[in-house]
Image: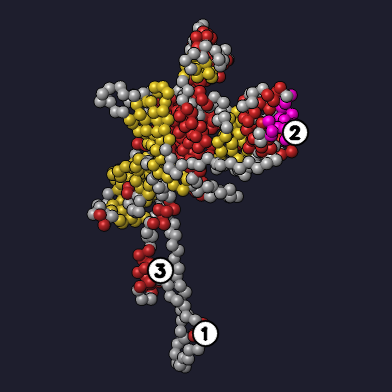
Amino acid sequence: MLWIAVTLPLLSLEAVKPPLSERESTSQSNQRDGIGETASGASDIRCYALADHAHILMPDVTAYQLGVQAGQTRSYALVLAPGLQMLTPDVEHETQAFEAMALALLAYTPKVSQAHAHTLLLEVGSGLRLFGGLRALLAKVASTVRDFGYTARMACAPTAWGAWLLAHARARREGHRWHVVKEASLPRALDALPVSLLPAVATYGDVFEQIGCATLADLRRLPRAGVVRRFGSDVLDLLAQAYGEKPDPRESFRAPASFRAQLELQARVDSAEALLFAARRLVMQLAGWLSAHHAAVSRYTLLLEHELAARHAPRTSSLTVSWAVPSRDPDHLIWLLREKLNQTELIAPAIELKIVADQIDEHAAQSDTLFPMPDADRDSVARLFERLSARLGSENVMRISMLDDHRPERAMNVEAYQTGQPERTSRQAKSKRPSRHSGAKSAAKEMPTSASDLAAGGAIEPSHPDSAAQTVLPDNALPLREPPQALVLSDEVPQPPRPVWLLDKPLKLVMREQRPVYRRPLKMLTRTERIEAGWWDGQGVERDYYIAADDDGRMFWVFRERLSGYWFLQGLFG
């Protein structure tokens, strides 16, 4: 087994901290590094801290770098960081944020358990190969936590409590090794950790240090009976579970039966970039919920609750994001949402977000086959259409579909691309299109066998050679002719080439010396191809098509109406 521990040391602050856009967070980091620092210095840097009525409880990273520390007075902290904003702790928001983080991490393993001190434990031993190894999986988990805007410290170990101890040691910058994979290396990594990391030891204050027990190795060397008599058995039980000497059963976090996620913004958000940064948390929760239920989504709706700016102004608005192929990839879902938000103008600043998953489907995992399947190319084309329609607008992306009609101007249809519309390939259209000789073939089978049948494509079954040998003929009878062999016509009739460019309306051509003229006289290059269709809708055509060329070698597709005798230009070859 292998466990990844994700501890969130600043969750109490970050749960009530207003979401910042990526641009704001980048500018603040540049100012902390001295890039683009103004004359006012730290007064332009926005930072946050938890505080009660008199003292600072927890500063964020930016405030800590400016000198703000826990225990300082509010007035002294404002002198160090004039841009400091005081926030009040909220236990309910803290619990919701912790559960939301657990729901998002279900995308990597179904075994996610909530542990002490805002720490999540992920059992990933059986899924390392799926995500490309431990290093790649750690990078993905860190990216998910970063998308939430949270500060995290991660570690891994063969035991759950071992990973928990290493993660908290990394948060306190104690120890030098935080990723342990082999069980043989775990005792050496844990022995160097301070004994104060154990939650059961924190209730006794400095008692362990007074008796000369500073590290976990010192605690293991103490007599077991004396430790149990003075401190109880919880300390040694937790220590045994951390070293893998005792089983550690844990209850996994369970995703709810139906998805419901909302985020109350701690500030007025009026820009699409900041709104996307906040909505990213909800999308990551949706991806984790879909992974836990082995499902995918093809459409979701983002509901925005706005600040009431006027009496008759709408209080809520919605934004629907849909795509053709059901997916649960968070990067794909967020990309489409970004394109939608960039094209949307907010009616008023938003104060709350909510996601409603409308269409939930079963997720079919991709199989790692040696040769790619044709569906993979179809999915990539659908993804391309989704991105184009999201960026340019669905009304600006046109889709060409084939129709079962022999008339060239009615053989295809151009319409606006709609997400979720099934794609119809040329092979499917060809299979549904009736064959030109299907009627002739069926008629030939029903008619009696004769010479005309052979000309029309009929077939005569040859008699058996044994029956011909047993026939007795009179002396004066003429010898019978050998029965003709069957004439078999192939279903695939070679079709003349078609031009890529068809005119919206056929262009009538003038005649000069019995030849149609389009800028120059045209010369026919092919034999006649006759098309007679449309009698069923009252717009029938009777045309003889040719491929023609002029003196410069340009090729055209022309036809002559059988009834009127006029010539028309239908298309142009490249």
Give the spatial CA distance, label 3 vs label 1: 27 Å
* Closer to the camera in the image, 557 or 20: 20
Q: Residues within 10 Å of mark 2 (few under 14, many from 20)?
A: few
Q: Is the magenta stretch mostly helix, strand or loop?
A: helix
Question: Please, is residue 191 above or below residue 541 in the view?
Answer: above
Give the spatial CA distance, label 2 vs label 1: 105 Å
The reply to whether the C-beta atoms of the residues labelled 3 and 2 are less than 8 Å apart is no
Question: Please, is residue 447 above or below residue 536 in the view?
Answer: below
Residue interval drawn in magenta: 212-230
Q: Residue furthest left?
A: 538
Residue 100 pos. (x, y %):
49, 34
Which numbered mark, 3 or 2, is in the foreground of this view? 2
Residue 363 pos. (x, y %):
48, 47
Q: Is residue 224 inside the magenta stretch?
A: yes
The circle on residue 223 is 2
Q: Is residue 41 inside the magenta stretch?
A: no
Residue 106 is at least partly visible in this image: yes
Q: Quadrant of the C terminus?
A: top left
Identify the residue under disc 1: 466
Question: At 38% from the left edge and 25% from the top edge, which residue is drawn?
Answer: 351
* Secondary element at tag 1: helix
Of label 3 and label 2, which has the lower sequence position? 2
Q: How crowded is mark 3: few (under 14 residues within 10 Å), some or many (20 or more)?
A: some
- Residue type at tag 2: Pro
Question: Please, is residue 554 above or below residue 465 in the view?
Answer: above
